[in-house]
Image (tube, rainbow, N blue to C red):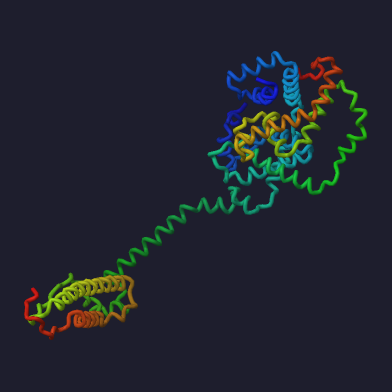
């Protein structure tokens, strides 16, 4: 080990960060090198000098002044957030069970009123007056009744009709969905009362729409094709 | 020592978060002088150091709820204090046109040549420390005066471990370069005996 390297290692030596072998090597070098001995001695002096520097201490009343400052500090946003509880916070906290009980009562009353409305209470609203009409909307499972055309049709028409058949199934499903949604709407309306005057002709409208779409999707086949039976 | 004073930093911080002012008082007692020593060495002004230590604790109290328990409490406190000290140093640099201490030093230079008083060696160290660049000075003070580990210093300064080591090493070398001639002179005067320093 040369002097240059040894001087680089001296700082690490005092931090006890050298490996055993490097430390041995360094000490061996220092034993035989006067300049490095001086360097090491100097480092020791500085370290010891720094440790011997008087440790500064704050005045005894530091804490009192600090606490006075904390208590007199304006309640900024951060101070308020820092869990310094105000009188109001304490009072609100103590009233928490009362608020909880009140909330529970309100929810229970609301639920009871809803049940009452469904069963038959409050018969003077529009929903109850029109109940007969409203209840006439029934929810039925999907039906797939259509008659097979008797005429002969071509293969291409057959393919087209097959597509139309799919469309019809979709339309039926949509119709059913529509009925279901209407049924749910009416149930909701019955529960809360009012606002469903528009549902008077609901059944009829649905039927009309269905027939219309059926006409469009599955028109009467007039063009006789090659005479082969497509089925 | 009461049972409260035996509490760890984390336990104290949890109590401080619940606005336990007794815990906060213990916490202040635990850190105030350590912080004061470090900040005083950095700023070389007791009044400013005291003000910064007070501000540090004020912020600890105000922002205790934001403390992240994954980190060490000491690291957090030191980081706040050092950031405040850095701000103060920057402010001082902006308004400082000349240093009155330099003039004093120049005026009394011949007098200081008369070495032999151990307190003068301390004075030499203090002056050399004052002249160190800030980034080296803070790493050096935390390591060699406050005796913190390199890992802690790296967390406080938010720099990699290797950077801390190199900064401390650089600071030591700078310090050595500054005071070595004077120390050698004193060494010659005291005929090799370092007992006068009261350090060996």
Q: Report the residue that reaches farthest toward the bottom.
A: A222
Q: Quadrant of residue B145?
A: top right
Q: Is residue B68 visible?
A: yes
Q: Vertically, is A156 above or below A8?
A: below
Q: Residue at x 68, y 45 (%)?
A: A70
Q: Nearer the viewer, residue A147 or B167?
A: B167
- Seen at 77% across and 29% down, the residue is B177
Q: Position of residue A23 (x, y in %)?
A: 62, 19
Q: Position of residue B184 (x, y in %)?
A: 82, 22
Give the percent coordinates (x, y) of residue B162: 61, 34
Q: Quadrant of the C terminus of chain A?
A: bottom left
Q: Where residue A101 sits in the image (x, y, percent)?
A: 42, 56
Tally of numbered discs: 0
Q: Quadrant of residue B163?
A: top right
Image-based side of B186 in relation to A115, left or right: right
Looking at the picture, tell me which residue is in the foreground, B176 or B27: B176
User: Quick check: A89 left or right of B50?
Assistant: left
């Amino acid at each position: 080990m040369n002097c240059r390297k040894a001087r680089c290692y001296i700082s690490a030596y005092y931090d006890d960060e050298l490996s055993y072998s490097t430390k041995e090597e360094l000490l061996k070098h220092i034993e035989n090198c006067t300049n490095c001995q001086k360097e090491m001695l100097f480092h020791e002096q500085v370290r010891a000098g720094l440790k011997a520097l008087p440790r500064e201490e704050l005045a005894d009343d530091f804490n009192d002044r600090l606490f006075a400052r904390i208590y007199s500090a304006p309640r900024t946003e951060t101070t308020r957030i820092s869990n310094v509880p105000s009188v109001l916070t304490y009072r609100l906290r103590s009233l928490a069970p009362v608020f909880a009980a009140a909330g529970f009562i309100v929810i229970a009353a609301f639920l009871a009123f809803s049940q009452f409305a469904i069963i038959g209470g409050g018969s003077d609203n529009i929903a109850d007056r029109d109940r007969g009409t409203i209840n006439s909307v029934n929810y039925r499972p999907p039906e797939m009744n259509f008659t097979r055309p008797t005429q002969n049709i071509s293969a291409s028409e057959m393919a087209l009709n097959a597509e139309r058949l799919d469309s019809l199934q979709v339309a039926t499903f949509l119709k059913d969905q529509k009925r279901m949604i209407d049924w749910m709407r009416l149930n909701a309306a019955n529960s809360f009362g009012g606002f469903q005057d528009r549902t008077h002709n609901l059944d009829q409208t649905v039927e009309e729409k269905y027939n219309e779409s059926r006409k469009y999707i599955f028109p009467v086949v007039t063009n006789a094709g090659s005479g082969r039976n497509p089925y | 020592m009461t049972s409260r004073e035996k509490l760890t930093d984390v336990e104290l911080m949890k109590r401080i978060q619940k606005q336990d002012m007794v815990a906060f008082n213990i916490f202040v007692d635990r850190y105030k002088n350590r912080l004061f020593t470090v900040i005083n060495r950095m700023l070389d002004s007791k009044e400013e150091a005291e003000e910064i230590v007070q501000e540090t604790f004020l912020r600890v109290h105000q922002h205790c709820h934001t403390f992240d328990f994954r980190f060490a409490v000491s690291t957090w406190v030191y980081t706040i204090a050092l950031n405040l000290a850095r701000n103060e140093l920057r402010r001082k640099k902006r308004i400082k046109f000349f240093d009155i201490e330099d003039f004093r030093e120049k005026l009394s230079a011949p007098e200081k040549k008369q070495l032999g008083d151990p307190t003068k060696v301390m004075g030499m160290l203090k002056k050399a420390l004052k002249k160190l660049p800030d980034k080296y000075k803070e790493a050096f003070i935390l390591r060699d005066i406050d005796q913190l580990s390199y890992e802690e210093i790296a967390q406080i300064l938010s720099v990699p471990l290797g950077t801390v080591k190199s900064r401390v090493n650089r600071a030591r070398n700078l310090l050595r370069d500054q005071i070595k001639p004077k120390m050698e002179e004193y060494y010659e005067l005291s005929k090799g005996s370092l007992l006068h320093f009261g350090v060996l």
